[in-house]
């Protein structure tokens, strides 16, 4: 039984296509055209004065900053099971548990999320068996002056409320 081998000839690209000069020039011409058009007519430029005006077209599925939920009596739902920290691909969640007197469950003594390392994937929310962590705070930006202020601790996370988009 003989194996038939079929040879496929590739079309050779012309020289101008191989060096991409034409495409670079065309892209730069389009960029320059938009630059000149916006420079001469600034009335048609759409912009948003951010802190005063909030964007209105944010999807309800958008993942904002994290928040820890509470029961009606004010206790945190989190039992420090470490499932969210295990599921986090960025490893930005740090939990330290402590025993709660008169209870079988644990509670978090330390619950920190480093927002500079977080990729906002939502896997921590999916992994939580108690629905204790959510990303529906409605806060979609955080501006701070130092790197340390981007570490959200348990007090900051539990004080955030559910936001409206």
Image (cartoon, rainbow, N blue to C red):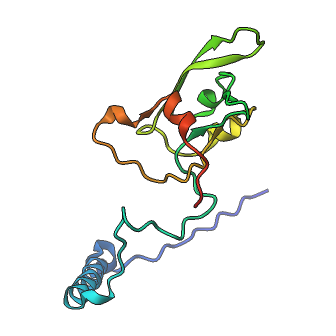
- How many numbered circles does the render carry? 0
Residue 132 falls in image quadrant: top right
Q: Position of residue 14 (x, y in %)?
A: 34, 80
Compared with residue 131, is residue 40 higher up or lower down, i.e. above or below? below
Q: Nearer the viewer, residue 26 or 11?
A: 26
Quadrant in which the N terminus is drawn: bottom right
Residue plotted at (72% across, 37% down): 131
Q: On the rendered structure, is 117 left or right of 45? A: right
Q: On the rendered structure, is 44 left or right of 112? A: left
Q: Position of residue 53 (x, y in %)?
A: 41, 68
Does the rendering let one see residue 92?
A: no
Does the rendering let one see residue 34?
A: yes
Residue plotted at (20% across, 90% down): 40
Q: Position of residue 128 (x, y in %)?
A: 70, 34
Compared with residue 150, is residue 26 higher up or lower down, i.e. above or below? below
Q: Position of residue 119 (x, y in %)?
A: 50, 44
Residue 26 falls in image quadrant: bottom left
Residue plotted at (44% across, 39% down): 115
Q: Nearer the viewer, residue 53 or 147?
A: 53
Quadrant in which the C terminus is drawn: bottom right
Residue 122 falls in image quadrant: top right
Q: Nearer the viewer, residue 114 or 111?
A: 111
Which residue in the rendered view is the most extreme toward the front?
73
């Amino acid at each position: 039984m003989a194996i038939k081998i079929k040879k496929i000839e590739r079309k050779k690209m012309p020289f101008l296509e191989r060096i991409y000069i034409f495409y670079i020039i065309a892209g730069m011409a389009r960029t320059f055209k938009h630059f000149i058009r916006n420079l001469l007519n600034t009335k048609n430029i759409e912009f948003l004065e951010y802190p005063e005006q909030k964007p209105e077209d944010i999807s309800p599925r958008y993942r904002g900053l994290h928040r820890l939920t509470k029961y009606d009596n004010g206790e945190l739902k989190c039992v420090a099971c470490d499932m969210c920290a295990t599921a986090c691909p960025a490893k930005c969640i740090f939990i330290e548990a402590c025993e709660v007197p008169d209870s079988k469950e644990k509670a978090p003594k330390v619950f920190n999320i480093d927002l500079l390392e977080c990729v906002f994937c939502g896997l921590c929310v999916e992994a939580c068996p108690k629905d204790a962590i959510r990303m529906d705070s409605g806060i979609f930006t955080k501006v701070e002056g130092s790197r340390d202020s981007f570490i959200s601790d348990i007090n900051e996370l539990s004080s955030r409320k559910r936001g409206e988009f």
